[in-house]
Image (spheres, helix red, strand yellow):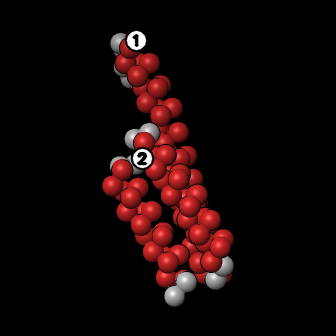
Amino acid sequence: MANIKSQKKRIITAEKARKRNKAVRSELKTYVKKVRAAVEAGDVEAAQAAANSAGRKLYIAASKGIIHKNQAAKRKSGVQMLVNGMSK
C-alpha cells in the first residue's frame, strides 16, 4: 500500500476509472449482441437500427479513450457487414 497521499488518491481514482471503463466495454458487447440477435431473427429494420446505435456507442467510447478509434471503426464495420449481408 502506498504511503504518499497523492498516490493513495491516484489508486482510488484509477479504480473508479477501471470500473467505469469495464461497464462501458460491457455495454458495447451488449449492443453488438443485439445486432447479432436481430440478424439471426432476420429482422432487417431492427438489425439496422441496432447497428446504428451500436456504432454511435462505439464511437463515443473511442472518443473517451475507452477503446482505440481503430478498434471502434473495425467493430462498427463488422457489425454493418452483418446487416448488409442480410439484405442480399
| Crowding near the residue tagged with mark 2, few <14, some 14–19, many ≥20 C-alpha atoms within 10 Å | some
The answer to whether residue 18 is left or right of residue 53 is: left
Residue beneath disc 2? 62
Is there any visible trace of residue 85 in the rendered image?
A: yes
Q: Amino acid at mark 1?
A: Lys
Labelled disc at residue 56: none
Is there any visible trace of residue 38 in the rendered image?
A: no
Determine whether 3 is above or below 66 in the image: above
Q: Give the residue furthest to the bottom.
A: 88
Please tell me which residue is depicted at 51% across the width and 32% down the height of the picture. Answer: 16
Determine whether 88 is above or below 50 in the image: below
Residue 23 percent location from the top left of the image: 55, 46
Determine whether 82 is above or below 29 in the image: below
- Label count reads 2
Residue 32 percent location from the top left of the image: 54, 64
Q: Give the residue furthest to the top.
A: 5
Where, by quadrant of the figure, is residue 5 drawn? top left
Q: Counting residues from the N terminus, which is met first, the one under dot 2 or under dot 1?
A: 1
Residue 50 percent location from the top left of the image: 61, 64
Q: CA distance from mark 2 to mark 1?
A: 32 Å
Q: Which type of secondary structure does the marked residue at label 1 adopt?
A: helix
Viewer-side residue, 12 vs 76: 76
Please tell me which residue is depicted at 38% across the width and 14% down the height of the picture. Answer: 6
Q: Amino acid at mark 2?
A: Ala
Viewer-side residue, 51 vs 30: 51
Residue beneath disc 1? 5
Q: Which type of secondary structure does the marked residue at label 2 adopt?
A: helix
